[in-house]
Amino acid sequence: MSVNTLEIIPPNRPITIGAILFPNMDQIDLTGPLSVLARLPNSSRQLLWKRIEPIHDHLGLGLLPDTTFDQAGAIDLLLVPGGPGQEELMEDEEVLLFLRKRAPKAKCIFSVCTGSIVCGAAGLLKGKTATTHWTALPLLKYFGAQPSKQRVVVDGKYVSAAGLTSGIDGALIVAALLRGEEVAQAIQLAIQYAPDPPFDCGEPDLAPPETLAIVTQQTAELTARREATAKRIAAKLGIEV
């Protein structure tokens, strides 16, 4: 059973957000949540990668880290986004080691989309309930996690959001858990977050069969690669599926 162990941090205590960037990520997994979290009172952020050099998300948008893993200071809130480049991160020992070192000291670990798969590869999901993008949801079992179709899942100090845009929902929940609902509500109003999608097909259970078939086919190759990698990692972690 999922249990929330997060506690509100007093407003006079600063919160440091550490957000991981990586090549071929989905920028909205980062920029969506940061549009919320960067508005937390008395907070600062570090954009983390191995080197301070421009990287590009999988659609070609340029992003610039400002802190290397070695330079990073204390991190209260660790944000792990996803995207196609997550495939390489799953077996990147430098990234996985950073997560393993920092996760125990962080007040909250927050993954968006397939960022949860990276956390799983680092061994952070054993015994946890978690979510991810719907195409990758079956992979969570390879990391000892219980998959959930919920848009946002809170389990202990680990918060996971499903695909892409759900990162905003997750960030608002994290904001409420760390700074209180009044703060989170003010941020939601400030960014005018009131979803009213033009089409009711944003979840596989809601989408027309032909739409679901198109997207499933478009992501089939990446999904197959992810599963093969997940199986290798499960063997390394000693997890039987």
Image (spheres, helix red, strand yellow):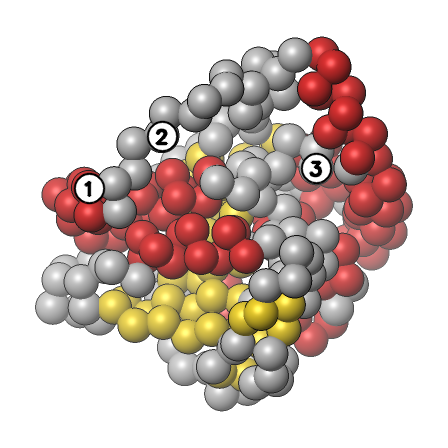
Residue 120: % across, % down: 65, 50
Q: Which residue is mark 2?
A: 195
- First along the sequence among labels 2 and 1: 1
Q: Which numbered disc covers residue 189? A: 1
In the image, taking residue 65 as reference, residue 15 lies left or right, namely left
- Report if the CB atoms under discs 2 and 3 are less than 8 Å apart: no
Which residue ends up furthest to the front in the rendered image? 198
What residue sits right under mark 3 in the picture? 136
The amino acid at mark 2 is Pro
Q: Position of residue 235 (x, y in %)?
A: 85, 50
How many residues crowd around disc 1 within 10 Å: few (fewer than 14), some, or many (20 or more)? few
Q: Earlier in the sequence, mark 2 or mark 3?
A: 3
Q: Nearer the viewer, residue 75 or 21?
A: 21
Question: Is residue 157 among what the camera can see?
Answer: no
**Image height of 163 relative to 100, above or below:** above
- The residue carrying pointer 2 sits among few (fewer than 14), some (14 to 19) or many (20 or more) residues within 10 Å by Cα, namely few
Q: Nearer the viewer, residue 24 or 199?
A: 199
